[in-house]
Image: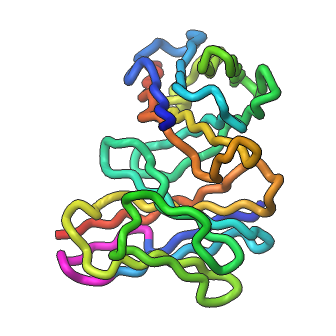
Amino acid sequence: KQEVTQIPAALSVPEGENLVLNCSFTDSAIYNLQWFRQDPGKGLTSLLLIQSSQREQTSGRLNASLDKSSGRSTLYIAASQPGDSATYLCAVRRGPFQGGSEKLVFGKGTKLTVNP
Amino acid sequence: EPEVTQTPSHQVTQMGQEVILRCVPISNHLYFYWYRQILGQKVEFLVSFYNNEISEKSEIFDDQFSVERPDGSNFTLKIRSTKLEDSAMYFCASKPRTDSYEQYFGPGTRLTVT
């Protein structure tokens, strides 16, 4: 059974700092990995999706990497801003050729606070 | 840009009552999902739906739950007799086709059972 763990559970940094959020998963037979942002009481905003054949994806100040063999992904946020304050969720999905399903398996998230 | 929409944004109901949560997926999407998130917990998969039938469901999705696509636009989740532990945020998601990678999530419905 796939388990997704995110460390740390919470992180507080001063504005302008570069930071890394970590995600690990127990079953390396994944199809893709997705990073989401969730603001308090709100829905899930997709940030980046990495296919299992890819090593990284970039969008603006965000860079996500994937090391499937070791079961790890990182989300790098450059020059953090107070508006980046939110909970960041990682989710993985098995593939159709791995006997997998469509469902996403989520981590519990890292709550990020960027202080002005 | 097309979005998944959900109504209501917040539903309060009494224990034992039936509730229907509604979702309008993106118009050309074919695959539909419900997830839930109990406060402070992980987002959990409930059910996936394709071609007018359930393709997968989790252990959470017991006989109290049902899903339906009553017309060409809506996708609903019904809870027949709500329990206190059904209080959660419920997210609908959709994706267009088999080979598409990403599920697009709606804003969620917060269900409070009293």
Residue B108, given in percent of the width and then of the height, sits at: 48, 61
Tell me what residue is drawn at x 43 percent, y 65 percent: B109
**Image quadrant assignment for residue B70:** bottom right
Compare residues A18 and B23 and report the one nearer the observer. Answer: B23
Tell me what residue is drawn at x 57 percent, y 38 percent: A91
**Image quadrant assignment for residue B86:** bottom left
Tell me what residue is drawn at x 75 percent, y 68 percent: B29
**Image quadrant assignment for residue A77:** top right
Q: Which residues are magenta?
A: B9-18
Tell me what residue is drawn at x 60 percent, y 11 percent: A18
**Drawn side of residue A9 relative to residue B29, left or right:** left
**Does residue A75 sit above or below A30 in this rendering?**
above
Residue A54, given in percent of the width and then of the height, sits at: 81, 26
Residue A17, given in percent of the width and then of the height, sits at: 56, 10
Residue B16 counted in the magenta span: yes
**Does residue A112 sit above or below B50 in this rendering?**
above
Compare residues A19 and B49 and report the one nearer the observer. Answer: B49
What residue occupies the far bottom of the structure in this picture?
B71
Compare residues B104 and A82 and report the one nearer the observer. Answer: B104
